[in-house]
Image (tube, grey):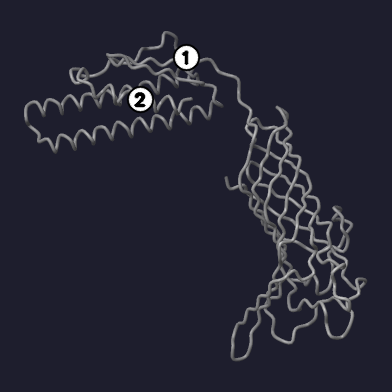
Amino acid sequence: MVNTTIKAFTLSAIFALSGAKLWAQDAPPAPPVPTEAPTADSNATRAARMSTEIAAAISEYSKDMAALQKQIADKDISKEDAERRRKELSKRLEDRLEAIEEMAEAWADNLEESIENLELNLGENLKLNIEPSAPRKKKIKKKIDGLVVLIGTNTLMNTASADYSSTNGYEGSWNPEGTFSSTFGVYDIDQRRMGTSPFWIRTGFGATIYSYNFGQSLLQFSPPTGAQFELVSSNVELRRSTLSMTYVEIPLALVINPSRRGKGLTASAGVFTGIRVGGSRQVVYRSRGMGRVSETTTGNFYGSLFSYGLQAELGYRRYTVGVRQNFNEPFNSAVLPANISSDSQPNFYNASVFATVRLF
């Protein structure tokens, strides 16, 4: 490829210029002129332009080095100054060749890698021959992987359904007005193309945190008044009352992306499943004489052992927006205390709207 060839050429040029024969030359011959005048956007024109840049850099370097050699021979410069000057000239040549390398890489990207190789040959007289090869068959990217971060908001639905137009958010203190509940996830994903088709299979492994904001109410599982499973008003001035449940999840999705390099527009749909690894409850309030108080308690809080549901996304390049619907209830009635009736457990399901970004 262009990158590797330019680097190899840079080394060979510096090595050749270090030889005794080079100092006898005033300047290298100019690069050969193409026998046919290419069009403005042709590969030959671009190659010739790069050839001119390289020849100019080497010409300037050889002239400066020849002048330095003469100063050394005439004893017009000390060894220390000569060594410093030699390093400056070498560094300047290296910087110019690196700039040319970056230009070549940009061309290769714009041409969709249609230039497979540039044959750069330095002879004893520094003759530079650049011959672009015929365009090769375009490569198709087969795999995409990286770390994906998911950030979104969720709401509690009174029925588990992907048809959001026919469902209402669960009302009451379980879903207080003005509060913000969130879904946050981090996943290591692996996406592979199915042959040469526009279809991909994406899977991964990561953690998802579902956080529920109960506003000015406290989550209470075994109130002293009897069989209830509810939120109760707090006897302190609550600033925040939240419950967070963490799950290790595995997503599996079918992705449609017709781009040859896996970029462009993307649509996906699939499932996810996970297992609970813990939870925490946090209340923040103000207390007279103590100021702001934050209390955090860890535990399972009768949270559902498993999480599972459907997920769909639309995206462009490494960014997506999507929705997910959990089909597991947030709390597991099978493990509720004996004094709490399972019939009194609220019947709701988590639905999330989110955005994701693939970091690398």
* Label 1 packing within 10 angstroms: few (<14), some (14-19), many (20+): few
Percent of width and height locating residue 129: 38, 14
- Pointer 2 local density, CA inside 10 Å: few below 14, some 14–19, many at least 20: some
Q: Residue at x 61, y 44 (%)?
A: 146
Q: Quadrant of the C terminus?
A: top right
Vertical comparison of 222 with 31: above or below:
below
Residue 142 horizontal side relative to residue 346, left or right: left
For this orientation, the residue located farthest to the bottom is 289
Residue ID at (9%, 26%):
73
Q: Quadrant of residue 337?
A: bottom right
Depth-wise, is mark 1 or mark 2 nearer the camera? 2
Relative vertical location of residue 83 with respect to residue 299 in this rendering, above or below: above
Viewer-side residue, 275 vs 65: 275
**Where residue 152 sits in the image (x, y, percent)?**
70, 58
Q: Could you tell me the amino acid type at mark 1?
A: Pro
User: Dot 2 corresponds to which residue?
Assistant: 53
Residue 284: image quadrant is bottom right
Give the left or right position of residue 14, taking residue 129 as reference.
left
Report x, y in % for residue 148.
Answer: 63, 49
Which label number is shown at residue 96?
Answer: none
Residue occupying the point 71% across, 62% down: 277
Which type of secondary structure does the marked residue at label 2 adopt? helix
Which of the labelled discs sits on residue 38, or is there none? 1
